[in-house]
Image (cartoon, coloured by chain):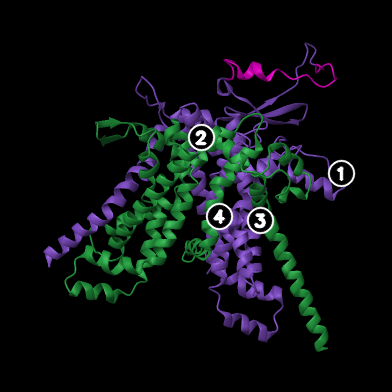
Chain colours: A purple, B green
């Protein structure tokens, strides 16, 4: 018997070994390497060995400071006014550039600020672009997750009807999913084009020229919205299919019972369909969120993070630094930050959607 | 009374089909536009975009954009590279992941539960978070080839293939499928003295058509559409896949006709394949969701 067990031990390791080795080498090792590199100054190619630099990468990326500046006063204690009659503030640059009185703000730049009292309060960041990237990524996730999940559910309910030819529609709605996001991005950059783009042509045709032609990707206030819309267009079919498979697990007898009780359409959805989709809903939410945090290809093809950093994202920054500038350590630190964010968000989602007893 | 409700039903049917068709138009018009435009000279393409002619194959229709695209970039090489990388990865992945899943589902061995837990835990690690350290790792890995040991995997086929052979999702799909197979079959084969490997090859694999199709389709979509990884690891033209080849068409004054031709060339075969095997594609996506 013992020999049989050792034999199955050997078989087990022999059959699972290659997969285990590959996952160790190409998923788990890089994951720990990312953590390791993020505490060094590792570069892709360098004549010098990497040195341990502690938390400096994280400090560089995440360093924040709050500073309140009061207006300048003259010798008599009166507020000095500038040319426009506004109270004159000390120059921010003099504080953040090698000022021995404020070592903690050295090298920081203004991220945003607001007036408070006579003066102004500044939030300073050591890396304003990265902060913008974090905010943009969260905006993308917060809009895409409910929008794509909700639209996908709507489509699934529409497709779940018993109608002749419904499979044709299902096939069409799913079509963009099999097309590469890179292809989709390039195609849509034509659709969004200011002068010849189809979107502007359609809008000006239905409004008889009243809607002005917009440079969708070249305008900081529309670029992210344009990318969001296109991303949803490409991926919504994927989650439609997941919702559909969830819908089909709901027992028809429940619907029959509902019909006998005279439930309205809304009541049927609210009390039969939606409770039956609980697990699917959690899955769809978690999967969309994880995918959305990885936003990269659309940015790389369509905007390269511009205009004015309005489409910078965390992954785009990680690749720009880790690959573009060959700064593996900074890219790794960004990767670790992203992982911590994704993990915390999905833990929060699981907690909020847990089965309440 | 009966007449009214009959009419009502007819009207509702019309409304339903109208809604379905409008949505279908939103999903299909960009793709139709892409294919139609690929047949037009850039000048006409831009002019046609201002009217319904954008979706109609009218005017000066030819395959010239395709010939020009082939002149601008080594398109055939890119297609060959993509097909090679995708094909090898899909086949290797099916073999490696199904064997591992077999060991996880049927064989009892020390370390099994721990190994499976670790593999499933990797599902929460998005590829984007390991891409950068993996780039450095790949630049230093050794390889034993015909010319002895060489260091560094960048600019090769293997760097695009090997890291993607085994993944948590594929193994998970196989394990789930194997657990639903009738256990008596495996028991009976064991009693008859068949080796584990024989059971894997002769009993389990022949029953695994659906899950093999699912895993192959998912892997195919991921591999053929790879972009982030190959732009980093293939600086040399010789190894570039189709999605990276797109960069040859990025320029200030974009030749849209050629771009549409290239996009159609790399997309239409996949779309045709999808439409042909539509049920299998959709079933494979659905199966990633069922058990969550």
Indicate the position of residue A166 as horizontal and vertical percent values: 63, 70
Residue A296 within the magenta-colored segment of the rendering? no
Q: Residue at x 70, y 17 (%)?
A: A91
Q: Chain for mark 2?
A: A
Which residues are drawn in magenta?
A: A78-102
In the depicted view, which residue is nearer to us: A352 or A260?
A260
Q: Chain for mark 3?
A: B
Q: Residues within 10 Å of mark 3 (few under 14, many from 20)?
A: many
Query: CA separation, marks 2 and 4?
Result: 32 Å
In the depicted view, which residue is nearer to us: A88 or A8?
A8
* Residue ID for mark 3: B27
Q: Chain for mark 4?
A: B
Circles 1 and 4: CB distance less than 8 Å? no
Going from N to C along the chain, the mark reached first, 4 or 3, is 3
* Residue ID for mark 4: B271
* Residue ID for mark 2: A318
Q: Nearer the viewer, mark 2 or mark 1?
A: 1
Indicate the position of residue B171 as horizontal and vertical percent values: 37, 57
């Amino acid at each position: 018997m013992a020999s049989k067990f050792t034999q199955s031990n050997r078989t087990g390791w022999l059959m699972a070994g290659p997969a285990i080795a590959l996952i160790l080498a190409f998923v788990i090792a890089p994951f720990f390497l990312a953590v390791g590199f993020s505490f060094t100054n590792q570069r892709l190619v360098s004549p010098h060995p990497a040195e341990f630099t502690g938390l400096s990468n994280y400090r560089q990326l995440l360093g924040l400071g709050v500073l309140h500046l009061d207006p300048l006063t003259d010798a008599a204690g009166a507020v000095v006014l500038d040319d426009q009659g506004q109270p004159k503030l000390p120059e921010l640059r003099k504080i953040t550039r090698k000022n021995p009185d404020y070592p903690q703000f050295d090298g920081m730049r203004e991220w945003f600020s607001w007036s408070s009292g006579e003066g102004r309060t500044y939030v300073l960041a050591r890396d304003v672009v990265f902060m913008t990237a974090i905010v943009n990524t969260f905006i993308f996730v917060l809009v895409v997750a409910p929008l794509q999940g909700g639209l996908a559910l709507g489509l699934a309910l529409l497709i779940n009807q018993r109608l002749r030819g419904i499979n044709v529609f299902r096939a069409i709605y799913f079509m963009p999913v099999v097309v590469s996001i890179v292809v989709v991005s390039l195609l849509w950059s034509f659709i969004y084009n200011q002068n010849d783009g189809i979107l502007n042509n359609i809008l000006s045709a239905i409004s008889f020229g009243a809607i002005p032609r917009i440079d969708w990707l070249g305008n900081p206030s529309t670029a992210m919205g344009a990318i969001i819309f296109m991303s949803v267009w490409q991926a919504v079919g994927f989650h439609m299919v997941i919702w559909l498979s969830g819908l089909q697990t709901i027992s028809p007898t429940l619907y029959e019972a509902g019909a006998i009780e005279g439930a309205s359409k809304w009541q049927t959805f609210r009390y039969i369909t939606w409770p039956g989709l609980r697990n699917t809903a959690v899955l769809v939410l978690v999967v969309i969120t994880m995918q959305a945090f990885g936003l990269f290809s659309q940015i790389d093809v369509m905007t390269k993070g511009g205009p004015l950093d309005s489409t910078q994202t965390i992954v785009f920054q990680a690749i720009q630094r880790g690959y573009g500038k060959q700064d593996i350590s900074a890219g790794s630190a960004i990767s670790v930050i992203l992982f911590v964010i994704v993990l915390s968000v999905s833990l929060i989602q699981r907690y909020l959607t847990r089965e309440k007893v | 009374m009966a007449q009214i409700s009959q009419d009502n039903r007819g009207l509702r049917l019309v409304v339903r089909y109208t809604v379905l068709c409008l949505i279908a138009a939103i999903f299909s018009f960009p793709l139709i536009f892409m294919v139609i435009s690929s047949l037009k000279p850039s000048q006409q393409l831009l002019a046609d975009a201002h009217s319904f002619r954008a979706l109609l194959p009218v005017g000066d229709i030819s395959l010239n954009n395709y010939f020009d695209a082939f002149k601008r970039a080594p398109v055939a090489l890119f297609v060959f590279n993509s097909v090679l990388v995708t094909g090898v990865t899909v086949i290797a992945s099916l073999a490696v992941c199904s064997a591992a899943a077999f060991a996880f589902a049927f064989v009892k061995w020390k370390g099994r539960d721990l190994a499976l837990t670790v593999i499933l835990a990797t599902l929460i690690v998005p590829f984007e978070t390991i891409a950068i350290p993996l780039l450095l790792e790949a630049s230093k890995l050794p390889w034993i080839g015909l010319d002895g040991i060489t260091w560094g995997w960048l600019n090769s086929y293997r760097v695009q293939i090997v890291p993607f052979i085994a993944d948590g999702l594929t193994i998970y799909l196989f394990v789930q499928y194997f657990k639903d197979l009738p256990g008596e079959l495996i028991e009976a084969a064991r009693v008859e003295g068949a080796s584990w490997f024989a059971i894997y090859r002769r009993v389990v694999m022949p029953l695994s058509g659906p899950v093999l199709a699912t895993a192959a389709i998912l892997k195919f979509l991921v591999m053929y559409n790879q972009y982030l990884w190959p732009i980093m690891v293939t600086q040399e033209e010789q190894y570039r896949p189709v999605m990276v080849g797109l960069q040859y068409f990025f320029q200030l004054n974009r030749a849209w006709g050629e771009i549409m031709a290239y996009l159609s060339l790399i997309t239409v075969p996949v779309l045709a394949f999808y439409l042909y095997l539509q049920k299998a594609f959709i079933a494979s996506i659905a199966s990633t969701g069922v058990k969550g």
